Image (cartoon, rainbow, N blue to C red):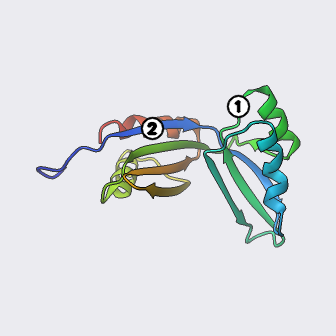
Amino acid sequence: MAKGEAIMKLKADRFDIWTTSIKDKPGGLVKKIEPLAKAGVNLNFLIARRSAKRPGTGIAFASPIKGAKQTKAAKKAGFKKSRSMSGLKITCDNKKGMALKVTGAISDAGINLRGLSGATLGKQAVLYLAFDSVKDANKAARCLKKI
């Protein structure tokens, strides 16, 4: 760390990632998330995109889905809790170079990122990181405590 460089305050929370296939047409995503809303799910993470390999389809990633009622609704809508990836939500102050510091620390620890999405709102920033395992997500959370 350079002299005079402030240490970022950040919070890292691990989360499960739920996935489902969607039809690539108007309302395709709505049909998947409407049952979640009716079951009281309050998503803080939702990404949907087309599939380049399967024209006419897409995939959605969502979290959190917790408890029996929400889990039942998610499964009925076609969502499955991923066994091949785990997430880490990073919340911190919106500072220049924040994403570089986070991804650099993870890289320096020898951990490979599977995906990253981020956004800022005013003075706050959030990064959603995907890893290949819970073990990698937990290791990343530990290494991020040092920055």
Query: Which residue is tagged 1?
Result: 66
Task: Please name the residue shown 29% across and 44% down the image.
Answer: 8
Q: Is residue 141 above or below residue 97?
A: above
Using residue 78 as the reference point, say whether residue 88 is left or right of it: left
Q: Which mark is residue 12?
A: 2
| 38 in relation to 122, above or below | above
Q: Going 40% across and 34% down the picture, which residue do you hit?
A: 142
Residue closest to the eye, 20 or 143: 20
Residue count near mark 2 (Cα–Cα under 10 Å), binned few <14, some 14–19, many ≥20:
many
Residue furthest toward the right?
76
SS class of the residue under badge 2? strand
Question: Nearest the camera: 8 or 42?
Answer: 42
> Where's residue 29, x and y in %?
79, 58
Secondary structure of the residue carrying tag 1 is loop
Please give the name of the residue rendered at 32% of the width and 40% of the height, measured from the top-left corner.
9
Q: Is residue 45 left or right of residue 100?
A: right
Residue 22, horizontal then vertical, whole percent: 81, 59
User: Residue 20 at x, y = what percent?
Assistant: 78, 51
What amino acid is at disc 2? Ala
15 over 53 or under it: above or below: above
The answer to which of marks 2 and 1 sits earlier in the sequence is 2
Q: Is residue 100 left or right of residue 45?
A: left
Q: Position of residue 80 (x, y in %)?
A: 78, 42
Q: Quadrant of residue 35?
A: top right
Q: Quadrant of residue 84?
A: top right
Q: Viewed as shown, does residue 75 lie left or right of 43?
A: right
Residue type at tag 1: Lys
Query: Which residue, as the protein is rendered here, is positioned at the far left?
Result: 3
Looking at the image, which residue is at 72% across and 38% down? 41
Which image quarter holds the C terminus? top left
